[in-house]
């Protein structure tokens, strides 16, 4: 989906910019050019920033989880491999 039609900026590009550290509309404008033409996309773009309506949709990269694994301990009993 396009966020900014004037500059052909996609939802994915906005998500990637946020994952790389963009934290406000000014950052998105500087990195991507969002809302630098007609401005109609500014509100939608800011909804992808932390605290926005679509912030949860940015995925693990924006949450800083790339390369991390969550481990839950279910048992402390040793497990024997059966051949």
Image: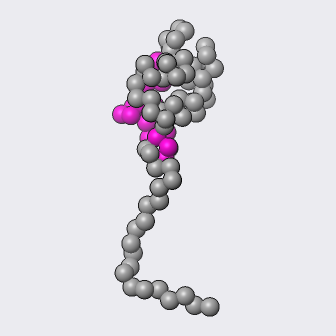
Would you say residue 69 is visible in this rendering? Answer: yes
- Residue drawn at (43%, 86%) of the image: 78
Highlighted magenta segment, given as a residue range:
42-62
- Residue drawn at (49%, 18%) of the image: 29
- Residue 48, magenta (yes or no): yes
- Residue drawn at (40%, 29%) of the image: 23
User: Looking at the figure, which quarter contains the C terminus?
Assistant: bottom right
Q: Residue 33 placed where, x, y %? A: 54, 17
Q: Toward the viewer: 6 or 13? A: 13
In this figure, what is the number of numbered marks?
A: 0
83 w.r.t. 24: above or below: below
- Residue drawn at (49%, 46%) of the image: 60
Q: Residue 22 placed where, x, y %? A: 45, 29
User: Looking at the figure, which quarter contains the N terminus?
Assistant: top right
- Residue 51, magenta (yes or no): yes
Q: Residue 76 placed where, x, y %? A: 37, 81
Would you say residue 54 is visible in this rendering? Answer: no
């Amino acid at each position: 989906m396009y966020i900014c039609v004037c500059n052909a900026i996609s939802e994915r590009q906005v998500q990637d910019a946020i994952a790389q550290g963009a934290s406000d509309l000014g950052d998105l404008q500087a990195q991507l050019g969002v809302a630098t033409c007609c401005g109609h996309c500014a509100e939608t773009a800011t909804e992808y920033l932390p605290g926005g309506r679509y912030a949860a949709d940015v995925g693990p990269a924006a949450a800083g989880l790339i390369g991390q694994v969550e481990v839950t301990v279910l048992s402390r009993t040793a497990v024997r491999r059966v051949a």
